[in-house]
Amino acid sequence: MKRVCIDCGDILKNRSKATKRCRACDILRRNKSARGRIIGVYCKKCGKELSYKKTSSHLCRTCYVKNPFSAWNKGTKGICVAWNKGLKGKQIPWNKNKGTKTPKDKLIKNSNDYKLWREAIYKRDDYTCQKCKKRGNRLHPHHIKNFSSNKELRFIIGNGIALCEQHHKEFHKLFGRKNNNRTQIKKYINA
């Protein structure tokens, strides 16, 4: 006995025995079902049939978007106040001193010259910390004479030494970040 679709009369192929409709009729029925959809309700403005959940405005999507006073902002024209009203002269832009302006020190430390200097320091010191003599620690290149006040010595290999992260921080805690010199580094390494 052949099973037939109850809507269109086509023969049911590859469908379970419980189904009574073909795929096409089943999809068509699901699209027109009352589950979450409304049929027979029309838009108040254009008269178009609503084919989705009923809204409080009873408008279709196109009319709802065109309507500037839809349910969420009805009657609020002119009531909204700007967040910065009355702050004239006190306003500070959120991106002041930010954005494309990068400090010169960071630009220099990201430069190719700095990277080559750092690599030369590591190779010369055989990738070992000069304080603890451990190899393979996370190394930091340290300027013997300050980076900021000695611009001409920034990329000279003789002005650098390899220290591990821990000892580099420890050195700057003891001697600070400015006015560093060779006697301080010798005192620190020999201590």
Image (cartoon, rainbow, N blue to C red):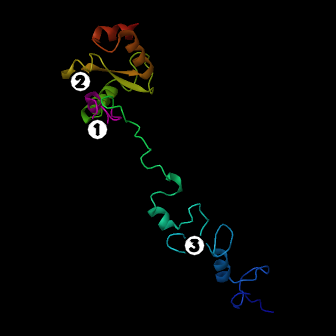
Cβ atoms under marks 1 and 3 closer than 8 Å? no
| Depth order, front residue of 148/166 | 148
**Disc 1 versus disc 3: nearer the observer:** 3
Amino acid found under the numbered disc labelled 3:
Tyr
**Residue 150 among those drawn in magenta:** no
Classify mark 1: helix, strand or loop: loop
Q: Type of residue at label 2?
A: Arg
Q: Which residue is mark 3?
A: 42
Q: Which residue is mark 2?
A: 154
In whole angstroms, how far apart are the C-alphas of marks 1 and 3? Answer: 54 Å
Q: Which residue is mark 1?
A: 100
Q: Residue 184 in the image: x percent, y percent?
A: 32, 9
Crowding at dot 2, Cα within 10 Å, few <14 / some 14-19 / many 20+, comes out as: many
Q: Nearer the viewer, residue 31 or 10?
A: 31
Of pointers 1 and 3, the one earlier in the residue sequence:
3
Main SS type for the magenta part? Answer: loop
Please tell me whether residue 106 belongs to the stretch shown in magenta: yes
